[in-house]
Amino acid sequence: MDYTDIIKCNLSKLGESYDALKPYMIKHLETVECLIQEKNKIRDTAVEAIKNTDYSLSSISKELNMSRTTLYNHEQLLKRYIELSVEASQASDPFITISSLRDEKSQLQEEIGLMMKRDLDIELLKNQNEQLKAEIKEKNKEIERMHKKIAELSTMSK
């Protein structure tokens, strides 16, 4: 299989020129790329196998040619056994783990957003409170000045 285009693309990302390489280095790169592609194919096959594994009661009864009623008989022992196996499998399933972690991350980001909004609201209230205190202080000074003026006018009119 010819991996020349992949090698050229990867070399350009590394800032290297394919044409400047010696033949033995090109041969080594082709060997490495061949192994990498084989490993990618194995990984992709494994991922597909994991994704396509189905532990549902209907799939198990179908694969075993067993009626679903049989799975529910005898105090549902077979059903409970399958459910236990499903739980054990899901505990080690990377796709379920990833999904769970994404959900948790999303929830935490939402909580962070709410906390940031809360903190911003608190800071705005503090700022508004300081402004109102300053206004009250000015109003109190104005009232005091007016009281003095009233007292002064009262003493003058007597």
Image: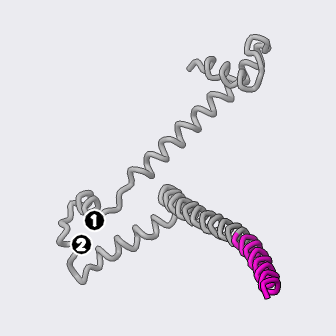
Tag 1 residue: 57
- Magenta: main secondary structure: helix
Q: Position of residue 91 (x, y in %)?
A: 50, 67
In this picture, which residue range is highlighted in magenta?
Answer: 132-158
Whether residues under marks 2 and 1 lie with C-beta atoms below 8 angstroms apart, the answer is yes
Q: In the rendered view, does 7 fall on the left or right side of 72?
A: right
- Furthest-top residue in this view: 19
* Direction from residue 116 to residue 57 in the image, left or right: left
Horizontal side, residue 93 vs residue 65: left or right? right
SS at badge 2: helix
Q: Residue furthest front?
A: 158
Q: Disc 2 to disc 1, how far (Cα)? A: 8 Å
Where's residue 110, x and y in %? 54, 62
Residue visible at 71% across and 21% down in the picture: 12
- Residue 116: which quarter of the image? bottom right
Q: Quadrant of the N terminus?
A: top right
**SS at mark 1?**
helix
User: How many residues crowd around disc 2 within 10 Å: few (fewer than 14), some, or many (20 or more)?
Assistant: many
* Residue 70: assigned label: none
* Position of residue 26 measured from the top left corner of the image (x, y, whole percent): 73, 18
Rendered position, 142 above or below 98: below
Quadrant where the image shows the C terminus: bottom right
Question: To which residue does mark 2 refer?
Answer: 71
For marks 2 and 1 on the same chain, the one whose residue lies earlier in the sequence:
1
Identify the image's colour scheme: rainbow, by chain, secondary structure or one colour: one colour
